[in-house]
Image (spheres, grey):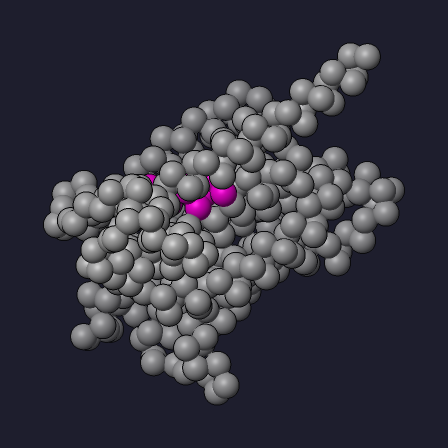
């Protein structure tokens, strides 16, 4: 009987989690669209979205200016922030589950820096690959991030055959600093594109438009599905590789798929928004603390909460000292830095 009550409580808790996360995301999107230099009533925002996206009839006449502001400026910006936040949080949850360490995320593992080097190289050299065109930026960014991840694993394995999580993270941080020097070199050699590259590196979804939403959407969907289909395997890996093997998990194949999915999400997010740190660290950790470590639920919940979090962060970045906009990376670092320190202290006490 106690076991039955425990299962019922767990299911109720997860259901509440999904309802809360969806409500949080919806609230973030609406307030992200409504607040700005031209305030738009919440009800009008919901009505416009209902009409433009679901074909619902307008209950009242709405100013055409409001419709244009929502659909051409704010909604694509909010959607882009939602995709980027969801992608980084999802990748962070996968990396933390893979390494069994809450300090792992795209930023600390150096994947973001690798993807940034690829993206800056595309802008610096004006690279356009045949048949890819506009998709050259995210594809090269993803490849660079994936290659960086394998370098981290290679050096970590060389230092420690058991590839302890703290070794992987330490190598990631060192490699991230090393790659940062390449970015600095390209910036130093850059002429007219200097302002664009520096602004991009600090993280922003400003003035991107629908084209960037269409750019990240397919990569986000692919990465999300890859990781979601490997959620049970992430749960098995949490108990160790030997246990996972006994449970019938093809360790090497699943590891490759998980790493590829996480790199896909990180590279595409960096390509459209620049380097935004700590989202992949903070959101999965808090989600795990509240709703547990089961990746079948942790992954989608991290997407919802990460998306809503970055929408609100972008809102703060563009309204805190309006009309000047702050880079999103500045806000996430201010939030994530102290949280990173708290997690680090808690991990140290457990050792």
Locate residue 207 relative to residue 238 in the image: left or right. Answer: left
At horizontal 77% and vertical 52% (from top left) the residue drawn is 251
Please say if 251 is above or below 321.
below
The x, y position of residue 168, in whole percent, is: 57, 46
Q: Is residue 71 above or below residue 249?
A: below
Q: Which percent across, then down, holds residue 125?
A: 34, 79
Q: Specify whether residue 282 is in view.
A: no
* Residue at the far top in the pictured view: 2
Whether 91 is drawn above or below 238: the answer is: below
Q: Residue furthest bottom?
A: 130
At 37% from the left edge and 41% from the top edge, which residue is drawn?
28
Count of numbered circles on the image: 0
Q: Is residue 348 left or right of residue 118?
A: right
In the depicted view, which residue is nearer to us: 286 or 30?
30
Residue 236, quarter of picture: top right
> Which quarter of the rendering shows the C terminus?
top right
Looking at the rendering, in which quadrant would you find the N terminus? top right
Q: In the picture shown, does residue 299 fall above or below 221?
A: above
| Viewer-closest of 4 and 179 | 4
Residue drawn at x 50%, y 86% is: 131
- Residue 204, position as x, y percentages in the image: 30, 55
Residue 310 lies in the magenta stretch: yes
Does the stretch in magenta take in 79? no
Residue drawn where x is 78% and y is 18% of the image: 4
Q: Nearer the viewer, residue 265 or 181?
A: 265
- Residue 209 in percent (x, y) is at 32, 65
> Which segment is the magenta one?
304-314
Res 142 visible = yes
Q: Main secondary structure of the magenta part?
A: helix
Q: Nearer the viewer, residue 296 or 260?
A: 296
């Amino acid at each position: 009987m106690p076991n039955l009550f425990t299962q019922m409580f767990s299911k109720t808790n997860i259901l509440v989690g999904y309802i809360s996360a969806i409500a949080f995301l919806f609230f973030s999107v609406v307030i992200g669209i409504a607040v700005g230099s031209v305030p738009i009533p919440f009800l009008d925002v919901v009505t416009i979205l209902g009409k433009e996206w679901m074909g619902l009839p307008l209950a009242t006449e709405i100013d055409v200016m409001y419709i244009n502001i929502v659909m051409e400026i704010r909604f694509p910006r909010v959607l882009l922030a939602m995709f980027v936040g969801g992608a980084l949080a999802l990748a962070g949850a996968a990396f933390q589950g893979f390494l069994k360490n809450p300090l792992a995320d795209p930023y600390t593992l150096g994947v973001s820096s690798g993807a940034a080097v690829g993206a800056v190289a595309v802008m610096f050299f004006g690279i356009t690959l045949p048949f890819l065109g506009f998709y050259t930026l995210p594809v090269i960014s993803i490849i660079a991030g994936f290659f960086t991840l394998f370098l981290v694993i290679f050096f970590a394995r060389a230092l420690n055959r058991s590839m302890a999580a703290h070794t992987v993270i330490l190598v990631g941080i060192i490699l991230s600093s090393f790659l940062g020097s390449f970015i600095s070199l390209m910036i130093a050699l850059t002429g007219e594109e200097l302002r664009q590259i520096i602004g991009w590196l600090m993280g922003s979804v400003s003035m991107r438009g629908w084209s960037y939403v269409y750019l990240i959407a397919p990569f986000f969907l692919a990465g999300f599905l890859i990781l979601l289909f490997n959620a049970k395997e992430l749960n098995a890996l949490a108990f160790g590789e030997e246990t996972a093997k006994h449970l019938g998990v093809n360790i090497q194949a699943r590891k490759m798929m998980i790493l590829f999915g996480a790199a896909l999400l990180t590279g595409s997010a960096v390509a459209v928004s620049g380097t935004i740190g700590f989202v992949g660290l903070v959101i999965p950790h808090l989600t795990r603390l509240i709703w547990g470590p089961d990746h079948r639920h942790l992954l989608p919940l991290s997407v919802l909460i990460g998306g809503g979090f970055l929408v609100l962060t972008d809102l703060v970045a563009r309204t805190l000292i309006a009309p000047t906009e702050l880079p999103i990376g500045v806000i996430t670092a201010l939030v994530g830095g102290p949280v990173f320190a708290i997690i680090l202290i808690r991990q140290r006490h457990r050792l």
